[in-house]
Image (cartoon, helix red, strand yellow):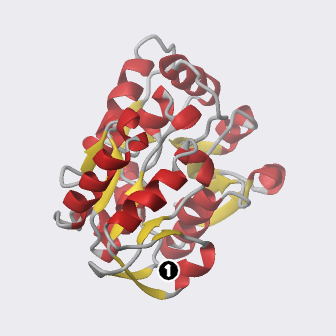
Amino acid sequence: MRVGVFGDPAFGGVQLRGVQVAEQMGWEFVPLDQLHQAGRFDFGIVVKYFGHHGQALRNICGRLIYDPLDAWHQGNPNVYAHWWERFEALQPDVVIATSPACEAVMRLSTMPATHLCTVAMIPHQPDARLMWVRDPQGPIVYDGELAYLGGEWKTIVAAAKRLGLRAKHGTAADRGQRMGVSLLLHPRLGRTATTINRYCKPQIKLANAAHCGLPVLATDDPAVMTLARTVTVLPVSAWSDIDILEQAMRTAIDAEPVHPDLAFAHYGERLRKVMESL
């Protein structure tokens, strides 16, 4: 059985869910700009597809699995219309959701489609390079783009300082170093707190926290709350209130870490089971 994994390797998500998985499973990774010379596949898995090459992918794949991750441009698209258009354009046999909230939205989006597809839920796996460990006296870490904080980084720094802790903006260099962390932050604020982000954004930060045994403080996004019930959550509007944020940080630092089930889910093996079900 020939299995191809397709995507643009310039995206970090495609590296984790595409290139690395293909290597682990003995499948072939094919960049989207090389489809014309790829040949025929029994199964194709397309990762983070933005709407190009749809017909070419269907032509070379007997069965097609679509793992979209966050394949949408920033803004506030209608979440149901977005997925309906993607499903109609690509016509996958299976589409992968990364949280129960996203799975529910995708199932509703398939109803008006002329091409029916199955929705399977497989959470994002962690970045295996991380060697962070839980340390109640360590920094409070935000490992993401500052744009997702909606201008609240100063409030986060000030709230952490009240607890006698340092707020640290994680970098790519930190991911390969052993580091003690008291709390991992996972907010989605400002213009990025859109419906599609809150319901469908892949939760790699939760997977990373589970991998490292860390507690998390997040915004009350449905994707977060349906995937990891031990996470401390705070409404979007409360992150600008330093008193509320300080207390939430204190509570989260003492809370249970994210459940390790998220850390050990083997994405490639679960994909193989999806293929066997077709």
Whether residue 227 appears in this view of the structure is: no
Where is residue 194? Give x, y as percent: 51, 29
Q: Residue at x 53, y 60 (%)?
A: 17
Question: For mark 1, does the 10 Å Cα neighbourhood hold few (<14), some (14 to 19), or many (20 or more) residues?
Answer: few
Residue 106 location, x and y as percent? 41, 28
Secondary structure under tag 1 reads loop
Please name the residue shown 51% across and 13% down the image: 114
- Comparing 75 with 40, the one in front is 75
Q: Nearer the viewer, residue 151 or 203?
A: 151
Q: Is residue 33 above or below residue 72?
A: below
Whether residue 147 is visible to the viewer of this picture, yes or no, is yes
Q: Residue furthest bottom?
A: 178
Q: Viewer-proximal residue, 155 or 60?
A: 155
Q: Quadrant of residue 108?
A: top left
Q: In the image, is 25 to the left or to the right of 162?
A: right
The residue positioned 60% from the left and 55% from the top of the image is 145
Report the side of 60 relative to 70 (left or right): right
Q: Which residue is mark 1?
A: 129
In this figure, what is the number of numbered marks? 1
**Rendered view: 189 above or below 175:** above
Who's the residue at 67% across and 34% down the image?
73
Query: Where's residue 174, x and y in %?
Result: 55, 80
Amino acid found under the numbered disc labelled 1:
Arg
Front-most of residues 161 and 172: 161
Q: Which x, y percent locates residue 268?
A: 42, 64
Among all residues in the image, which is located at the extreme top?
A: 112
Split into 4 quadrants, where in the image is the C terminus?
A: top left
